[in-house]
Image: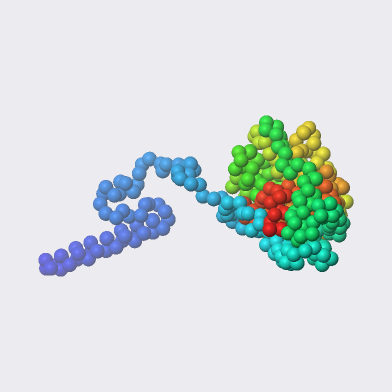
């Protein structure tokens, strides 16, 4: 055998051995028996095959320092933003525009005549002040005009302002009641769609910014969406949410919320309630039952707030009567004043039902809930 042939045979043998080695290695890798080949060298092999077991999976660590991500980016309404509170007059749009036209017409006449009175009557009725309250306001205004010998339109508008503020001032205190160092429960009642859940979110945001520790009770166990929305808000404001399974007994939710508040030293429990049950009687009985559960803690129930949608105008008034008959309503939250010309309903609620309007909703963002201030409201209508 020539030396050339011997060299060629050795080379062939070497190639065959290398090929066999690689094939075995790949099959073994597919079975997971060995680590993948290191990029190069023996040191890399040692690193790739440590003798000590792999460290345990890391414990979840505290988040990186810095602002925490907002947990409610997916809140379903525009409530995410919380800009500075708006001015009432800027949000009363339609109601204000209707009054402005009428008041301009009254002033434009200079004096006071039958048309002046017709104009005022029409304006109040169109703003859903309602016939009884409109009649009362205009009778009182006529009497004042007679006594004060008012013959000038500007003076009459001034007197109207005085009458409207006086009418609103007759109703009770508008402050939301809460006492430091004891449990405070505010129940929110009202039919579906009026803005109860949104209002509770706004109130929770505001009260937590004032330093209150809050528990939210999702006692409307028929609407999962409402509980979801409250859950997002509970996260955002650091409140605890107590909710039940769908269709669970709302009474047990309220009971658990009261215990949670005691356990955690929370001073404010906001209770969302159902707005619809099979019958109206069922609904009212249910609310009455929830009320009794809260009252097992003497003095805890500070507010029963009826949420009414201003865009429903006089219909809101009949709802208010029904709720007021069933549960002692301590105040009204009038929502959606920003989207209606029926803002005069405030006057009807106060004059006919003697329930103070405590808060008004003027938009969908967190800051769009304002304390109701009679002078501010009347000035926004008449100026
Ligand atoms: P609930 O069924 O009574 O709980 O009503 P929601 O809180 O779900 O509100 C119903 C709708 O009314 C939602 O689209 C809210 O964003 C909207 N809403 C609530 N309050 C106001 C308000 O003051 N102004 C406006 N424009 N919309 C509001």
- Point out residue 367 in the picture as x, y percentages from the top left corner: 62, 51
Front one among 355 and 305: 355
- Point out residue 173 in the picture as x, y percentages from the top left corner: 75, 42
Where is residue 28, by image quadrant?
A: bottom left
Residue 291 lies, with reference to residue 34, above or below; the image says above
Residue 20 visible within the image: yes
**Figure label count:** 0
The N terminus sits in image quarter: bottom left
- Point out residue 119 in the picture as x, y percentages from the top left corner: 80, 65
Residue at x-position 56% and y-position 50%: 71
Question: Which residue of the protein is positioned furthest toward the left in this rendering?
Answer: 3
Front one among 330 and 354: 354
Question: Which residue of the protein is positioned furthest toward the top in this rendering?
Answer: 181
Where is residue 263, by image quadrant?
A: top right
- Point out residue 42 in the picture as x, y percentages from the top left corner: 26, 49
Residue 309 visible within the image: no
Q: Say whether residue 20 is left or right of residue 12.
A: right
Residue at x-position 31% and y-position 53%: 38
Front one among 146 and 375: 146
Residue 170 lies, with reference to residue 21, above or below; the image says above
Residue at x-position 58% and y-position 51%: 84
Query: What colour scheme does the image use?
Result: rainbow
Q: Say whether residue 39 is left or right of residue 334.
A: left
Where is residue 107, by image quadrant?
A: bottom right
Residue at x-position 80% and y-position 45%: 170
The C terminus sits in image quarter: bottom right
Q: Say whether residue 338 is left or right of residue 65.
A: right
Front one among 90 and 322: 90
């Amino acid at each position: 055998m020539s030396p050339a042939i011997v060299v060629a045979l050795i080379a062939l043998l070497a190639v065959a051995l290398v090929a066999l080695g690689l094939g075995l290695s790949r099959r073994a890798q597919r079975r997971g028996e060995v680590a993948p080949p290191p990029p190069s060298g023996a040191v890399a092999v040692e690193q790739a095959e440590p003798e000590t077991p792999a460290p345990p999976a890391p414990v979840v660590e505290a988040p990186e320092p810095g602002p925490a991500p907002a947990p409610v980016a997916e809140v379903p309404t525009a409530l995410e933003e919380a800009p500075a509170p708006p001015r009432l007059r800027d949000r009363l749009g339609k109601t204000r525009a209707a009054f402005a036209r009428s008041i301009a017409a009254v002033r434009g006449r200079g004096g006071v005549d039958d048309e002046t009175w017709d104009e005022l009557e029409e304006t109040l009725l169109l703003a859903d002040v309602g016939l009884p309250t409109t009649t009362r306001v205009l009778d009182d205004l006529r009497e004042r005009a007679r006594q004060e010998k008012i013959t000038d339109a500007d003076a009459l508008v001034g007197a109207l302002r005085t009458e409207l503020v006086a009418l609103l001032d007759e109703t009770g205190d508008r402050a939301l009641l809460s006492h430091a160092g004891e449990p405070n429960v505010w129940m929110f009642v009202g039919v579906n769609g009026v803005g109860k859940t949104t209002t509770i979110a706004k109130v929770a945001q505001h009260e937590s910014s004032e330093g209150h520790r809050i528990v939210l009770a999702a006692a409307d166990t028929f609407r999962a969406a409402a509980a979801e929305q409250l859950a997002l808000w509970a996260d955002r404001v650091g409140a605890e949410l107590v909710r039940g399974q769908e269709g669970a007994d709302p009474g047990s939710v309220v009971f658990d919320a009261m215990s949670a508040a005691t356990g955690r030293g929370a001073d404010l429990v906001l209770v969302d309630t159902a707005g619809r049950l099979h019958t109206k009687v069922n609904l009212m009985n249910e609310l009455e039952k929830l009320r009794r559960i809260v009252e097992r803690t003497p003095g805890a129930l500070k507010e029963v707030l009826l949420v009414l949608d201003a865009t429903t105008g006089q219909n809101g008034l009949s709802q208010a009567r029904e709720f007021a008959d069933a549960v002692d309503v301590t105040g009204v939250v009038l929502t959606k004043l920003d989207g209606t010309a029926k803002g005069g309903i405030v006057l009807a609620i106060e004059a006919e039902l003697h329930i103070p309007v405590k808060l008004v909703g003027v938009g969908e963002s967190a800051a769009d809930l304002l304390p109701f201030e009679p002078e501010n409201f009347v000035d926004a209508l008449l100026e």
